[in-house]
Image: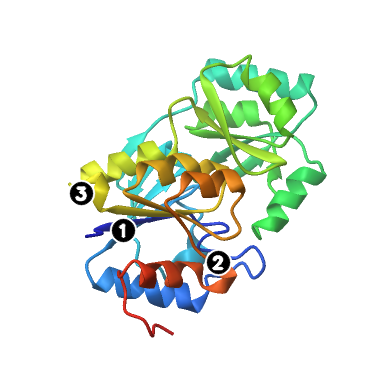
Amino acid sequence: MIKAIFLDVDGTLLSFNTHHIPQTALDALRQAYHSGCKLIIATGRSAADLHVIREVPYEAVISLNGAECVLRDFTPIYKKLIPAEDFHKALELSKKYDFPLALETNEGIFVNKLNPIVIEIARLIDHPVPTVIDIEKKFAEEECSQLCFYCDEETEKKVIAQIPNLFASRWHPIFADVNVRGVDKGMGLGILADYYKIDISETLAFGDGGNDIPMLRKAGTGIAMGSASDEVKAAADYVTDTVDNHGIRNALIRLGIIRPGVS
């Protein structure tokens, strides 16, 4: 019996085309929730950046790819901060390899410079373009659990090789989320399953990006969205339709979690 459903946001709950949750997904998740399933968000976003899915009756969030786990009211469960030494090395390397570096916090995304990649990623998820600030000063003033590298995979590998305490994951080829090594959505799933005293076999996870792979492998049942890459699909137990083609609803019906006929 499934007791908890873990849900990625961009490309899974939210369509990249409409930037909204399909009504079929919202109705299906509400039915699952009222049948006793806990709904838990698992995202690279911060927990404060979920206004667009506020209608989903979720109870907790694995945010920043597992670096922070909180209840919906922001009660903290777990946090893993970026060490200062690693941030300063990342900043030095961003200048050397000439790519924008950002801090992602509950206050927003703050970047050291803009380029077309930063603007394109903001457009893709229907976000404001990040604010350019002195991120070194910002890092000293508040806690940070996630960095963002706006660069290709080749550059990312060169940088991460020089900061072995950090790990990069991707949901898009021109952008990487960066956390402390060992932090990922799969770890977050385990933390919140333990918090709610739910066995891993009783969990279900939906995702579409490379950063969802650890969660899909960790869950009792991992479901890849139809738009996912072959690598993501290979990590899942089942591949559903795309978000725009009612992938969440269709999977929940197929698995017997909700009744057919949800509109």
Tell me the tag on residue 143. none
| Mark closer to the chain start, 3 or 2 | 3
Nearer to the camera, 226 or 189: 226
Determine crowd level at label 2: few under 14, some 14-19, many 20+ residues with C-alpha closer than 10 A.
many
User: Mark 1 is on which residue type?
Assistant: Glu
Q: Secondary structure at mark 3?
A: loop
Q: Position of residue 213 (x, y in %)?
A: 49, 42
Q: Position of residue 62 (x, y in %)?
A: 40, 46
Give the residue at x 43% y 73%. 26
> Quarter of the image containing the N terminus?
bottom left
Residue at numbered disc 2:
243
Labelled pair 1, 3 in contact (Cβ < 8 Å)? no
| Mark closer to the chain start, 1 or 3 | 1
Tell me the tag on residue 198. 3
Q: Secondary structure at mark 2?
A: helix
Q: Comparing marks 1 and 3, which lies closer to the viewer?
A: 3
Give the residue at x 50% y 68%. 247
Determine crowd level at label 1: few under 14, some 14-19, many 20+ residues with C-alpha closer than 10 A.
some
